[in-house]
Image: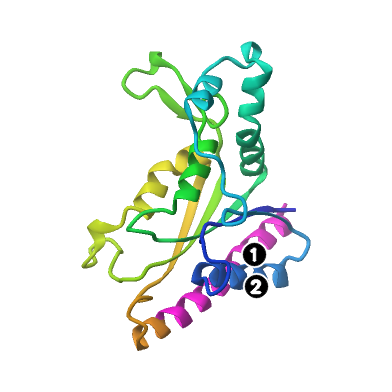
Amino acid sequence: MTTLLRIDASARRTGSLTRQLGDRFEAEWKRERSGDHWNYRDLALQAPSHISEDWIAAAFTPADRRTARQETRLAESDRLIAELVAADIIVLCVPMYNYGMPSALKAWVDNVVRIGRTFSFDLSRGDFPLEPILSGKTLIVLSSSGEFGFDKGGVRGEMDQLVPHLMTLRHYLGIAEHHLIRIEYQEFKDERHAASVTKSLEESAGLARKLTASLSQEAAMA
């Protein structure tokens, strides 16, 4: 059985394009593999706390020396990390806000990329002391943007601070494989946007079919 973690990062509960992409991907996945387990984290309903001085002090205190108050401060982070650890596939439904990620997603990232839990730190490694702990996960990024041309080489390729940020972090989330589907032209509301919505919804369903078929084939050969 495969475990999937769906994270919705859009502040909009209705009319969200990234939620529509997530719904299409999830529906197609469940049609092909109804026995897989899904966990859900809606950051619009329950945004993670931003890290603070107390959080940092607790995270960098060895586990066997933490106070009860420090353990309480890290409890939310522990829950989010547990969801991440359990996931084989992360379905991240995230719009581009001001060319980057929504603040609620940044708070999630700051809570899960944590010393001793998702990365280790050892100065004996020289100039690269951080080393990921997790591995083997697949990340599906289902995104949307008001403008267009954010792919590498596009007219706004250098303005995208969302996908490159996620790719920089992917090792600390245990990501070995990733896929990106993105709706564009949202602010233009023209035929290009309509075509992008249709194309991306079809791609979401197609990606779900492709991945489920691969998993089923692997299971048959095991």
**SS assignment at label 1:** helix
Find out whether residue 174 is within the magenta segment.
no
Closer to the camera: disc 2 or disc 1?
A: 2
- Residue displayed at 64% across by 64% down: 212
In the rendered image, the residue lying farthest to the right is: 35
In the rendered image, the residue lying farthest to the bottom is: 191
Query: Gap between marks 2 and 1, in whole Å?
Result: 9 Å
- Magenta highlight range: 196-222
Q: Main secondary structure of the magenta part?
A: helix
Q: Residues within 10 Å of mark 1 (few under 14, many from 20)?
A: some
Q: Position of residue 196 (x, y in %)?
A: 41, 79
Q: Amino acid at mark 1?
A: Thr
Q: Position of residue 103 (x, y in %)?
A: 45, 49
Q: Are marks 2 and 1 in contact (CB under 8 Å)?
A: yes
Taking 221 as reference, is 59 above or below it?
A: above
Q: Amino acid at mark 2?
A: Glu
Disc 1: which residue: 212
Task: Name the one closer to the observer, 114 or 201.
Answer: 114
Q: Position of residue 43 (x, y in %)?
A: 57, 53
Quadrant in which residue 162 is drawn = bottom left
Disc 2: which residue: 28
Q: Position of residue 54 (x, y in %)?
A: 52, 24
Q: Is residue 75 left or right of residue 120?
A: right
- Residue displayed at 75% across by 53% down: 1
Quadrant in which residue 211 is drawn = bottom right
**SS assignment at label 2:** helix
- Residue displayed at 50% across by 72% down: 17
Q: Is residue 126 left or right of residue 108?
A: left
